Image (spheres, rainbow, N blue to C red):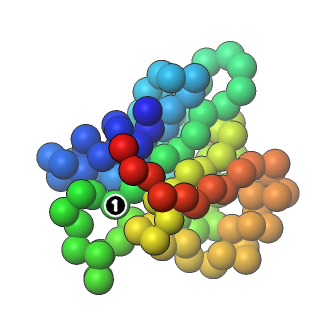
């Protein structure tokens, strides 16, 4: 579901990410960017296991110079929001500071998943 929502946002050039929990959309990314969207999603969390930040490239995104990005700060923000992890589109989302991303995710008990995300 998160991929479908994030792709729909990208189709109309709004954002590249969404936070999903148990089939419910907690937040979608717009002009405020990922960090503020994640913070807002944390306030919308429901009881039970946290949500997942899903980040994908926009369908017509210029992939040579303008890719969506996550990094160590993204992991810290996801943990602070009480989410469970991050899922990114493999080959279409840059991971800055990969070793630190892994270290922080492990420290917070979060998963970081990169995979092909065909609809």
- Where in the figure is residue 116, as x and y percent of width and height? 48, 58
User: Is residue 104 found left or right of 86 in the rendered image?
Assistant: right
Instruction: Look at 18% across and 48% down and name the residue there.
Output: 11
In the picture as drawn, the residue positioned furthest to the bottom comes out as 64
Can you tell which quarter of the image residue 95 is in?
Answer: bottom right
- Where in the figure is residue 35, as x and y percent of width and height? 48, 52
User: Is residue 87 found left or right of 30 in the rendered image?
Assistant: right
Q: Count how many numbered circles sit on residues in the image.
A: 1
Instruction: Look at 82% across and 58% down and name the residue there.
Output: 106
Name the residue beneath numbered marker 1. 57
In the picture as drawn, the residue positioned furthest to the top comes out as 47
Q: Nearer the viewer, residue 23 or 17?
A: 23
Could you tell me which secondary element the residue under label 1 belongs to? loop
Can you tell which quarter of the image residue 74 is in?
Answer: bottom right
User: Is residue 36 found left or right of 82 in the rendered image?
Assistant: left
- Where in the figure is residue 44, as x and y percent of width and height? 52, 24
Quarter of the image with the C terminus in it: top left
Residue 36 appears in view: no
Can you tell which quarter of the image residue 103 is in?
Answer: bottom right
Instruction: Look at 76% across and 62% down and name the residue there.
Output: 104
Q: Which of 84 and 32 is in front in this view?
A: 84
In the picture as drawn, the residue positioned furthest to the front comes out as 118
The answer to whether 59 is drawn above or below residue 80 in the figure is below
């Amino acid at each position: 579901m998160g991929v479908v929502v994030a792709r729909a946002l990208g189709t109309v050039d709004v954002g590249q990410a969404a936070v999903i929990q148990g089939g419910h959309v907690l937040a979608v990314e717009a002009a405020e960017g990922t960090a503020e969207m994640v913070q807002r999603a944390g306030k919308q969390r429901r009881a039970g296991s946290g949500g997942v930040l899903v980040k994908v490239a926009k369908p017509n995104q210029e992939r040579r110079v303008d890719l969506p990005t996550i990094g160590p700060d993204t992991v810290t923000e996801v943990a602070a929001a009480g989410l469970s992890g991050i899922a990114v589109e493999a080959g279409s989302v840059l991971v800055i500071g990969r070793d630190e991303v892994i270290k922080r995710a492990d420290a917070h008990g979060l998963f970081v998943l990169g995979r092909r995300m065909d609809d």
